[in-house]
Image: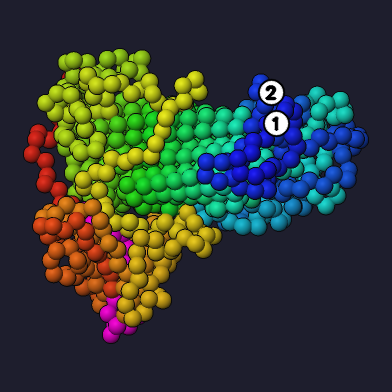
Amino acid sequence: MTAGDTCLIHGGVYRETVIPANSGISGSPITFQAAAGETVTVNGCDIVTGWALHSGSIYKKAGLPLKLDVLMNQVFVNGEQMIFARWPSKTNSDIWDMEYYQATGGSQYGLVDTNHLTQPDDYWKGGILCWCVMGLSTKAYDGGGWYQARMGITDYSQSSQTITMDDYDGCGQPSVEARYFICNKLECLDAAREWYYDTGAATLYLQTPNGDDPNRYLVEAKQRLYGFNLSDKAYINIKDINLFAGSILCQKDTNHCIIDNIKADHYWWSLAKSKNWTYKDSGIIIRGSYNTLQNSTLIYSSDDGVVLGGTHNSVVNNLIHDTGYAGPVCMGIRVEGGWNLVSHNTVYNTGKNCCGSVGTGLFHSVIEYNRWYNHSKLANDDGATYFTGLAAENTEIHHNIMYGPRPSCTYSMGLYFDEDCNGVIVYRNIVYSPYTVSSLQVNNPCEYSFFSNNTLYSYSKIWADWTRSYSLNVGCYFQNNISTQRCDIANWGAVYDHNLTSGNPRYTNAEADDFTLRSDSPCIDAGIAIEGITDGYVGRAPDIGALEYGASDWQCQVGHNFANPPVCKWTTANLRYRNRVENPSFERISSFPNDPTFDRLDGWTKYGSDTSTGEVVKSLTSATLSPDLIRHAVAKQCRHSAKLSSGAGIYQVIYGLTPNTLYRVRGFMRTDALAEGRIGVRNYGGEDFYKSNSAHDWSEVTFTFKTGSNNTRAEIYAYKPAEAWGYTYVDDFGLTEVSEGSTATPNIVIQETIE
């Protein structure tokens, strides 16, 4: 096929990975589409026949090479997914019921269970131990949270009733609170609906749901990860096609591809060995640039539902559910990269959160008009969203509705921004349902972020007071929010005004999830104008909360709509007081670790006598370090900083400034040897100005400048003089317009019963 061709596919099951030979071109894509009225399924499995009795109710198929890692295989009987054999066995088909044993002790590399580990020596050697580091009844994080670590078993002793693992988990170690099960051993196959694969013998073992001969059924074993592999391809359209036991891969060079109206069922499964808080691409993988996943239904992924990375990609108008059920730290939609769009999706039944990003490069993306619910089905200390360890660079999260954490989820939140999460713009979201901690959780350090015009109901609380002694929180705004049950913002130095902090907002019918305001609401005309957020308000002033009285009610527009697909376009609010620096914390590299074409100093330019050493360097995330270690860490926040040798500098030109306006420059610097480093500004309509720093600890450098009468740009820079030896590290830059401050009435407190 060549550019402009369409392949109309007749109904049937196609057991292959489709890899287009060619790319299309702009205006003439190559299209793979089901013929009208016909059902086409691309299946990742092959049929398995020729079963022989092994023993009891267990049958086997010898001489069957499975092409995938055994921990990523799947087996189906008449379309029903079978269970990878495990001990203890699952007694039901509920994917959210982990059915585990509880340990009685443990150590960094060992787990002890004096109640159940009674088998002979080496019985479990060679298996996989899947265990959870969170507590049961004796810990704050109780209630069934399951963040799963998976380690190989190198030894098992009957006398000590101890399993020895081949690795350890940095988040914790087995103890009396640990829960576990064992898999990847034939000895685990002792119940109906279980299977095991012996890699060395190339033999598949199976016990059917009825314990009878598998030759009576359609048995399928997974042989391919992907139904479509679009790596390095451009302008490919996939339309009206089903996927079974297979995913779609769009890698870094994939561009301008459209995946439209697919139905993916059981499209990803893995029990691969891993530690807590480790991530691998999973689910439908959308990287590259200008690619779109739209109008599709995705059901059953053990890990992420969708990974959205790269740049200028979109995930729009999809129904995604039952993801993250194997217990890893996964998301319905994981968002990375830049200028990406997540819009009008419905995501529910997730092991952890519905949408988020952890420790990656995320910048200038938009997450809007999504509906998220029934989340955190396996997790504690979790939210409908979860973002941490990133400089989000004015990523916008707006016009979303979220509710319904697992009832037993302790420490449940709606919008959750954990430590080291900077540069988020969060507005006009509706959060309701009984969250146990807060509807809006912001753990610091958090900088250059906006939280405005959000409606928080049952538990109507903003909590942003988890402070640390080494934290500086600047450029944050909390305005026009309804947070009537509690509002904790302590030691922040944030702008905090025009919020309804107690009393009755007087919703139209909150019990029926209608959060429009009644005509007698105290929120009407009580807010402050925020350019880009409250534009077009009705009345004397903007209202407090997500829904403007008398304006169009956008609640009905949230989530997917297959009957009338929405038209979505990436647009941003461009707030006046946002941080104007691109790549301010040098975190963009996190989304492109294997892409040599992506500039490690994206947005910055090297200069000086030694341009070879202006580089991004990596350290542990600050979330894992004590305050004393933070002061000397390579990165001030998150994972990266810029490293300058003598005579080296970096600069960035900031465009779109307003003439004759006061701006503040802020950055952090530390040196190896108490030598001088500089942060400065030039070419703004005034004299070159800089401040020096020679501290060994991370130290803040800040100053203001005023643009000239005709100047709309400025150049900020960091430089290490040639005569200074050692290295200088710089991190966390900001350039913001100096706020004029609020002159209207601050937060509104009403002494009456909350509705």
Residue closer to the observer: 526 or 188: 526
Q: Determine which quarter of the picture holds residue 73.
A: top right
The C terminus lies in quadrant:
top left
Please tell me which residue is depicted at 33% across the width and 28% down the height of the picture: 430
Residue at the location (66% across, 21% down)?
Answer: 37
- Decide which of 452, 289 is in the foreground and name it: 289
Q: Residue furthest left?
A: 743
Query: Which residue appears at 60% of the width and 40% of the height?
Result: 4
Give the CA separation, mark 2 to mark 1: 8 Å
Helix, strand or loop for disc 1: strand
Q: Amino acid at mark 2?
A: Glu
Query: Can residue 622 be seen at all in this image of the molecule?
Result: no
Q: Furthest-bottom residue in view?
A: 723
The image shows residue 344 at horizontal and vertical percentages of 43, 30
According to the picture, the residue beneath numbered tag 1 turns out to be 9
Q: Which residues are magenta?
A: 720-736
| Horizontal and vertical percent position of residue 205 | 82, 39
- Residue visible at 38% across and 39% down in the picture: 570
Does the stretch in magenta take in 728?
Answer: yes
Residue type (three-letter) at the residue carrying disc 1: Ile
* Residue with the mark numbered 2: 38
Whole-percent x and y of residue 196? 78, 41
Instruction: Find residue 7 and report its image quarter.
Output: top right
Q: How many marks?
A: 2
Residue 217 shown in magenta: no
- Residue 114 is left or right of residue 532, and the answer is right
Image spot of residue 314 (x, y percent): 47, 40
Q: Is residue 429 left or right of residue 361?
A: left
Q: Residues within 10 Å of mark 2 (few under 14, many from 20)?
A: few
Q: In the image shown, does 695 or 606 lie closer to the viewer?
A: 606
State whether residue 553 appears in this view: yes
Marks 2 and 1 in Cβ contact (< 8 Å): yes
